[in-house]
Amino acid sequence: MGTAIKKGKLHVVTLTVNGEEHAVLVKANTTLLDLLREEFDYTGTKKGCELGDCGACTVLMDDRPVNSCLVLAVEADGHSFTTIEGVEQGGKLDRLQEEFINQAAVQCGYCSPGMILSGKALLMRNPHPTEREVREAIGGNLCRCTGYVRIVKAILAAAEANS
Amino acid sequence: MSEATTKEFSVIGKSVPKIDARDKVTGRAKYTGDLKVTGMLVGKILRSPHAHARILSIDTSKAEQLPGVEAVITAKDVPSTFYGMSPARYDETILAIEKVLQVGDKVAAVAAVDEETAVKALSLIDVEYEVLPAVLDPLRAMDEDQPQIHPQYKRNISVEIHQDFGDVEMAFQQSHLVRTDRFQGNRATHVPMEPHAAISKWENGKLTIWSSTQSPHYFQYHIARVFGLKMGDVRVIKPTVGGGFGGKLEPSAAEYVSAALAMKTGRPVKIVFDRKEVFFHNRGRHAQYIELTTGVTKEGKILGVHGKYIIDGGSYTGLGIASAYYAGAMLPLIYEFDHFKFDCFRVHTNLPSCAAQRGHGAPQPRFAFESQLDMIAKELGMDPIEIRKVNARRPNTMTLNDLKVNSCEFMACLEKAREISDWGGKKGKLPPGQGIGIGCGGFITGAGYPIYRTRLPHAAAIVKVSEQGDIATLYIGAVDIGQGSDTILAQMAAEAIGINYEDMRIVSADTETTPHDFGAYASRQTLMSGHAVKQAGEEVRRQIIELAAELLEASVADLDIDRRVIFVKGSPEKMLSFETVANEFFIRKGPLMGRGSYTPPKLGGKFKGAAVGTSPAYSFAAQISQVEVDEETGQVMVTNVWDVHDCGTVINPNLLHAQVEGALFMGMGEAMYEQVVFDDKGRPLNANLGEYRVPTALDVPQVISELVDSYEPAGPWGVKEVGEGATLPTMGSYANAIYDAIGVRLYDLPLTPEKVWRAIHERKKPS
Amino acid sequence: MIIPEFEYVTPQSVQEACALLVQYGDSARVLAGGSDLLVKMKDGLMKPAYLVSLKNLDSLKAIRYETGTGVIIGARATHNEVMNNRLLREKYRSVCEAAHSMAADQIRNIGTVGGNLVNAVPSADLPPILIALDARARIVGTSGERTISLEDFFLGPGKTVLEKGEILAEIIIPDQPTTGSNYIKFGLRRAGALAVAGVASSVTVSDGTCRDVRVVLGAVAPTPMRARQAENVLRGKKISRELIDEAGRIAAAESKPINDIRGSIEYRRNLVNVLTRRSLKAAIEKGHI
């Protein structure tokens, strides 16, 4: 929020982001997306359309992908979130991130955080997905650069590494 | 035999990981909207609700009084300099002065402490409009009774082109078969996942702009011009960019308005478009209404072509003037014929402006030509690939519009596409409702002339080796918008110098610190920036070898560098490490640097518009697609696409195929899914990503991307373009495959299920 | 984009929620998942002064079976929870498939069944299959509760029978003799697309005879609609290809589509014809899928 003065009624929100618990004061009309980007500086979560159509703002809410542009910060209270910044652990890339690099699945990169989180959620609940299941899992993540070809390859490659 | 196959390269030709991939997969990469500058304000633009209206008055007093608002501006507060991309068509201002020319036109702007305050302030600005009748139908825009949009463009004609080569009438008279067909293209748009964004800072008479831009140079040039600043006082910096596709080649209101607000407030101002504003700014694909007449001999040899076009330019011209020329210039590229007439009207309408989008004016004409060629083949009883082989351009030829083609492996593309798709086993042999079709294309590798008249080289590069000799930094103006230019130019630098890719660092696209480059458009950077980089790297190599020769007491001619080792050819034990020599160089002589620049040769003919279409090299491609049509619903499932490209030497195979896959995907979207639509008041009905349908991961076919052996003498190491060429064949390929599947021809993009169903319906009616 | 400011309240019980809705009247909206409401607020189409959040009302989340009643789906169940629910997959997989066809994964993790029904968008994917399965809606208000047929729940685009202070609490799929059901959606891309037309059907078949049938059309009328004349073609008759074809034709004629950016009247009628045939065939041959 920068130098903005938060005027109006504020609500306390307690939430866990990337393993860290936070308590913040927010206005009711603040989205989770803005909270992550402005308050926590987690700018890896992107604004693509703000209306839930593109998936660039995807984060994991209790391990399930959601569009953070359509989650109010006040509704996020009590929940646990993973953003792209929380995917690598201790400076070590997740296998999925490595495959995105290896398979050249990243071009402009704007859809990549959302894609990776959707892919990660899929592999957590289904370690050996079919190609169709991979495409379903990223059906709500739009990409304009890749035609999805190498993104699908990367997620399947990461799944294979699981076996 | 191409040089590429005779020599194994050390760095180029390898699918090294992208230099910025790690930052992008971890969320560390910073795009313009992610940046924060101390004291930054948020800027928001008030946009017109009317397609065409006179501005009678604007009352900003209530907005100014809102706490947290630092500035409110209208046209009177900003320079009234007209701008655009071509001096012949400067017709746009920062904020609308007398009239608004489209829904979404820029009327006023505010800078406030946060977004919420800025949006509230916009709602407090009172604008009185006199609504005027709007021009919404490009086919009627030139009629006498239509409102005049710009005072200087009579009958709303933005660009009028008449080009005449040879004698088409005579060609048609000599033809065995002449066909005239009409095609209708769709108004599409780029949809970069990252909306336009800019942060402007005004300090001590100097403007710094961070911008999601495809060309810091063009932005610097135009912004300086409009604000009356010298270019050296305008610094444009490109952070990570989330896609451009041609839509970020012109400075937008994000740059102009944020700069104006920064000057007014003395504080940095950030403007990020929301998705709707991206649709308002647009600068996307012109809808082209094409009447194409082609005459052929009995053997299918094309004798003459006449193209008559009306293209919808929207409200302002911007780069759209070039699109109109490209629509004709590329048509004689891939097939050889001597007679061509091109008549084109680019008209203004009160709709968002159209300009450059991947393939720049050429995809829809390609759709028309490829569709018609198939129809001609059918009438002659020829196989679609055969008729293309009869006409395929050959290397080292000149087109009728004076485009010089060096390498050309189009024939090989056709043959390979036929083979890998099993065309012979499928054409005419698939079950009903399934079909296979071919579309072809070719595109420039960089434009022969820049967008404004200048003698500046097109690209430049500096390499600086570190004092320890362990790394080298490449300074380039070239712009990575996701296509990977940073990566492949780093590869080229490493190859030219003789070190490893991992030793390269890169600083790019900052007008104050990096050398000049025109930017990412017209698929120019691999060849043009690549030349400059190669030259700079080779200068470093030369200086290293000279010193090493001294140190090794050998002659320069006997030395070579590979992967950080300088050695005597034939006596590899006589060697020195790159580090040692570079370090010694610095000690003795100071900074070890190399410089390079590139200007294309003087190209093109003397006729009006001859510059457009010129290029040092051209890519070629053949694309075959296989479809399954559900005849009851008209739904078309594209099951497979095979693309075969002639793009010269490959610097990074993964990135190259990634570009083909992406370009093909965009072609697919425009071919079947995408269209911007408006109501009868010029208001967009689908300025969002729910109803403007970009295909999802579930909609795309299996793609097989292959190459043919090719070497382009005009390109460093033989390279050519690939980023745009694959967009061109797709629409024709699908239309032809659908015809093969259901026996009906569609002339009108996008090829939606409803249109397919209607066509089938018509076919079934007793005549 | 900005969401206009509002007062945010979080009642602890369904009754408290209803009371608040009465108190605030027209200036309040219920916040369930928010995937529809927040979009409308960002687009400037709605500016409620109060949002009454259901987030503490855990009783509305469950999907369970109650002997003597049937399957009960809490209004706060998300589309993915419906899609993945074991009980529903066993008994009425068609409902899971319909939930699956909505939007995309991210939206399905937020958007609730109740929200989807109350929004009453003519092209919604769940209402047709639920109506085909004779679903009931249990509505709770300050003065008590009522259970009505879901078919009677919708009044028009964006309009339902909910009165001031009422909340949709549960959807009940009653135990029933149906032997099969199915929903087919036609959208303009394979994810993230509204139905251009959608058809759900349910059948009760024995000895090759269609004892009972329901055909419910979506996106081709102001509300989801029963194609009763099409049903009459089949009801009580021996099933044949010709009858199914006729049912399709009649359903198309009964439908009331409009022209919009997704499709024309004529094309939508054609889709109703085709989808009705295909839906009936699947319901007859494959059970509740």
Image (tube, coloured by chain):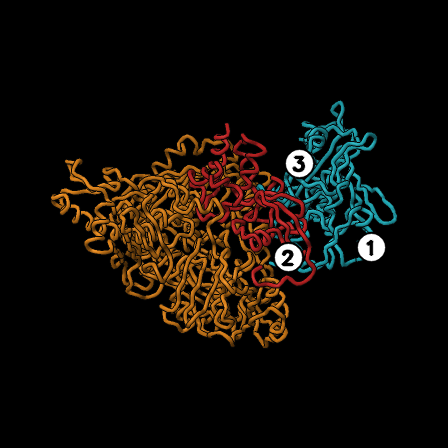
Chain colours: A red, B orange, C cyan
Helix, strand or loop status at disc 1: helix
Find residue B601 and report its horizontal and vertical position in percent.
25, 57
Inter-mark Cα distance, 2 to 1: 25 Å
Q: Chain of mark 2?
A: C
Q: Which residue is mark 2?
A: C42
Find residue B12 and report its horizontal and vertical position in percent.
30, 42
Task: Specify whether disc 2 shares its chain with disc 1.
Answer: yes
The residue mark sitting in front, 1 or 3, is: 1
Inter-mark Cα distance, 1 to 3: 33 Å
**Marked residue nearer the N-terminal end (1 or 3):** 1
Q: Is residue B435 something that shows in the picture?
A: no
Badges 2 and 3: C-beta atoms under 8 Å apart? no
Q: Which residue is mark 3?
A: C83
Find residue B665 and report its horizontal and vertical position in percent.
46, 45
Inter-mark Cα distance, 2 to 3: 28 Å
Helix, strand or loop status at disc 2: helix
Residue occupying image coordinates x 21% and y 51%: B585
Task: Specify whether disc 2 shares its chain with disc 3.
Answer: yes
Check disc 1 and give the amino acid type. Val
Outermost front residue:
B587
Residue occupying image coordinates x 74% and y 57%: C50
Q: Which residue is mark 1?
A: C22
Q: Is residue C130 placed above or below B180 in the rendered structure?
A: above
